[in-house]
């Protein structure tokens, strides 16, 4: 039964990203009444820009989407043993907005990577990066889709172990969101 408002954040801008595919699979498992896909195409954080023009419209929109969501799902690749620059930039900008949109917000994290770790280090860094915002960060089950090119058939996640973990994580996210 559909319910709730889920915000999906993908740490990759690429249309064919495995993390985008994973996010869309998880969205189906969560079954939200409303799904919003966050747009991370925002300017690079620049204190001079902030001083001169204030918070950019796209950044404020993202902060509002986080605040209005019942739950947030972040799917992001691991780049060079860390989080993607796009995701880090979004977190930096969000920290500059008024209020605390992440505070007590149920958040789940997943990753898909071509490599053998499935983005494990990137998830660790992302968890550490979110701690100052004080979300309700789910600890598991952990979803690391390793060897991502072989784990999808088109848009569909075909690895049953990954699918089972993803479905369980979405069930936990619904519980934390009290849906």
Image (tube, rainbow, N blue to C red):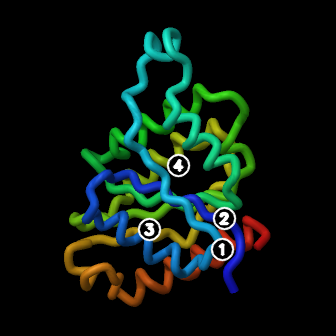
From this view, report whether residue 55 is shown above or below residue 53: below
Percent position of residue 87, x then y: 41, 43
Going by the image, does 135 lie left or right of 118?
A: right
Q: Which residue is located at x 69 percent, y 86 percent?
A: 1
Q: Which residue is located at x 34 percent, y 59 percent?
A: 119
Query: Do the residues under discs 3 and 2 have CB atoms within 8 angstroms?
Result: no
Between discs 1 and 2, the one toward the N terminus: 2
Q: Secondary structure at mark 4?
A: helix
Which residue was labeled with disc 2? 5
Which residue was labeled with disc 3? 23
Q: Which image quarter is the C terminus in?
A: bottom right
Question: Of tags 1 and 3, which is closer to the observer?
Answer: 1
Percent position of residue 43, x then y: 38, 30
How many neighbours does mark 2 have within 10 angstroms: few (below 14), some (14-19), or many (20 or more)? Answer: many
How many neighbours does mark 4 have within 10 angstroms: few (below 14), some (14-19), or many (20 or more)? Answer: some
Residue 159 placement: quadrant: bottom left
Between discs 4 and 1, the one toward the N terminus: 1
Instruction: Work out how far the residue at label 1 is from the one at label 2, CA to CA, in angstroms.
Output: 6 Å
Instruction: Work out how far the residue at label 4 is from the one at label 1, CA to CA, in angstroms.
Output: 27 Å
Which residue was labeled with disc 4? 127
Query: Do the residues under discs 1 and 2 have CB atoms within 8 angstroms?
Result: yes
Q: Secondary structure at mark 1?
A: loop
Which residue was labeled with disc 1? 33
């Amino acid at each position: 039964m559909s319910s709730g408002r889920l915000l999906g954040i993908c740490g990759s801008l690429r249309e064919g990203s495995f993390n985008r595919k994973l996010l869309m699979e998880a969205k189906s498992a969560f079954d939200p009444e409303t799904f919003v896909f966050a747009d991370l195409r925002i300017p690079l954080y620049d204190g001079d820009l902030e001083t001169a023009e204030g918070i950019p419209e796209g950044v404020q929109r993202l902060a509002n989407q986080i605040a209005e969501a019942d739950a947030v799902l972040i799917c992001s690749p691991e780049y060079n043993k860390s989080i993607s620059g796009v995701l880090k930039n979004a977190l930096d900008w969000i920290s500059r907005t008024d209020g605390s949109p992440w505070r007590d917000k149920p958040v789940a994290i997943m990753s898909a990577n071509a490599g053998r770790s499935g983005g494990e280090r990137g998830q660790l860094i992302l968890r550490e990066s979110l701690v100052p915002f004080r979300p309700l960060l789910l600890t598991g089950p952990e979803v690391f889709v390793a060897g991502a090119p072989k784990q999808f058939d088109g848009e569909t996640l075909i690895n049953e172990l990954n699918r089972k973990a993803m479905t369980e994580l979405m069930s936990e996210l619904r519980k934390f969101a009290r849906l």
